[in-house]
Image: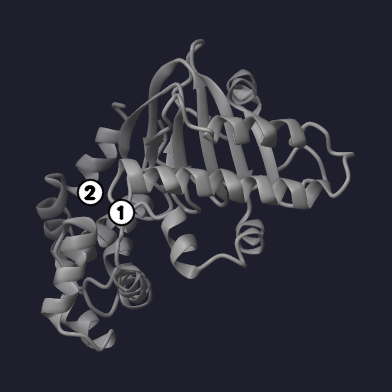
Amino acid sequence: MTNDIPYVTFNPATTDSHGFEIVPIEEIAKSKNEHEHNPELPHQLKFYNLIFFTQGSGRHFIDFNWYPVQKNSLVYLTKDQINAFEFSEELKGFCIIFTEAYFVNSFSNLSDDFVFRIFNPELFSPILQIPNNSDFTTYFNLLLKENDTPDTFNHDKTIQSLLTILISKAENLKQKLTFHISDSSKAVVYQKFISLIEQHLTQSRSANFYAKELAITYKHLNTICRELVSKTAKNVIDDFVILQAKRNLINSTTNSTELAYKLGFDDPTNFTKYFKKNTGLTPKTFIKSLSKR
């Protein structure tokens, strides 16, 4: 594996995709040597991707962790996440790929809380196991069928409607099978917290700073974070910083010294200590560890 991680953009097979495409995993595996990047090596997405595995078992690499997948596993990949396939003859399925513009347009009539929940790796596992008796598979097959008949009446709107239904079915399963947010107002505060970290990352890594920006107490921010993600507010900040650091470190154009200043550290040594404290590895050791995957 090289340290240079490619940024993969939406590149549909046809010009009339309108920002949406469904690609069989077998096709990606067969043509892996024809891509500018190897899909079995880490790459960063510039689009959204729902992967539904319909056969076999294996694992998928998401933001520096391997996750087991099997038949009926639904993988949520949001824009800018790092991922990699591990192909096998048994593992089959489909990638439902769409751009950010398509995502915004498709779900513009839904509540902000619902949209926030859909692709949020902080709040939910990126893997959802669909039960065998779920009607999710029925709607998935309808989406596949509609996608394969582009000349039908109102095709694009039908695709959008089926995708909305499909994701709604998955969200319903999340409420039954995984952690469910009962108070949407807390999710809104948490969303604002994450947005503020993105905006002020180089300015502060203090939970008190963000509590003041949110106009709430540090204790209240901590309570929300513990309830939603089982972490303190400081843990959330540190995890966010480390994830950005990892994403940058595996790009050969950014060395640890440059990255230290980019992330708001006034001394590269402090960044190295911070990184090791939170990961158990130095930045250099982390990069070497990825080559052993």
Q: Position of residue 190 (x, y in %)?
A: 30, 70
Kind of residue at disc 1: His
Q: Where 191 falls versus 82 (above or below)?
A: below
Q: From the viewer's perspective, tell me whether residue 59 is left or right of residue 104.
A: left
Task: Report the coloring of the rendering.
Answer: one colour
Q: Which mark is residue 180?
A: 1
Q: Which mark is residue 28?
A: none
Q: Which mark is residue 283?
A: 2
Q: Where 288 falls versus 184 (above or below)?
A: above
- Visible residue check, residue 36: no
Quadrant in the rendering for residue 96 = top right
Please state which of residues 66 and 128 is positioned toward the viewer in this rendering. 128
Q: Who's the residue at 48% across and 31% down the image?
A: 134
Q: Who's the residue at 13% across and 51% down the image?
A: 276
- Visible residue check, residue 176: yes
Q: Position of residue 47 (x, y in %)?
A: 57, 51
Q: Where 71 falls versus 39 (above or below)?
A: above
Q: Who's the residue at 57% across and 43% down the image?
A: 166
Kind of residue at disc 2: Pro
